Amino acid sequence: MSHVAQGRPKQVAIPLGDRPTYPSDEGQT
């Protein structure tokens, strides 16, 4: 899970102010 956390950390904990265009589980951009 090291490479995953490095490549896309937004998937784990996405701050509302630090989310560019990541279609996470919520889908908010």
Image (cartoon, rainbow, N blue to C red):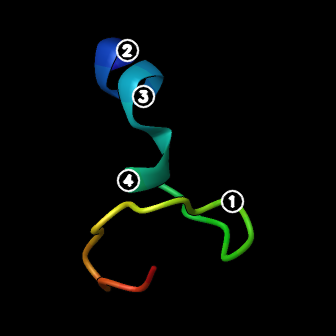
Q: Earlier in the sequence, mark 4 or mark 2?
A: 2
Q: Amino acid at mark 2?
A: Ser
Number of numbered tags placed on the structure image: 4
x then y, percent, for residue 18: 69, 59
Q: What label does residue 18 carry, if any?
A: 1
- Please tell me how crowded label 1 is: few (under 14), some (14-19), or many (20+) other residues with Cα within 10 Å: few
Q: Amino acid at mark 4?
A: Gln
Contact, CB < 8 Å: mark 2 with mark 3? yes
* Residue at the disc numbered 2: 2
The secondary element bearing badge 2 is classed as: helix
Q: Earlier in the sequence, mark 4 or mark 3?
A: 3
Report whether 15 appears left or right of 13: right
User: In what quadrant of the picture does the C terminus appear?
Assistant: bottom left
Q: Amino acid at mark 3?
A: Ala
Give the residue drawn at x 41%, y 86%.
Answer: 28
The secondary element bearing badge 3 is classed as: helix
- How far is the residue under mark 2 from the one under mark 3? 5 Å
Decide: is 21 above or below 12.
below
Give the residue drawn at x 32%, y 13%.
Answer: 3
Give the residue drawn at x 32%, y 85%.
Answer: 26
Contact, CB < 8 Å: mark 4 with mark 3? no
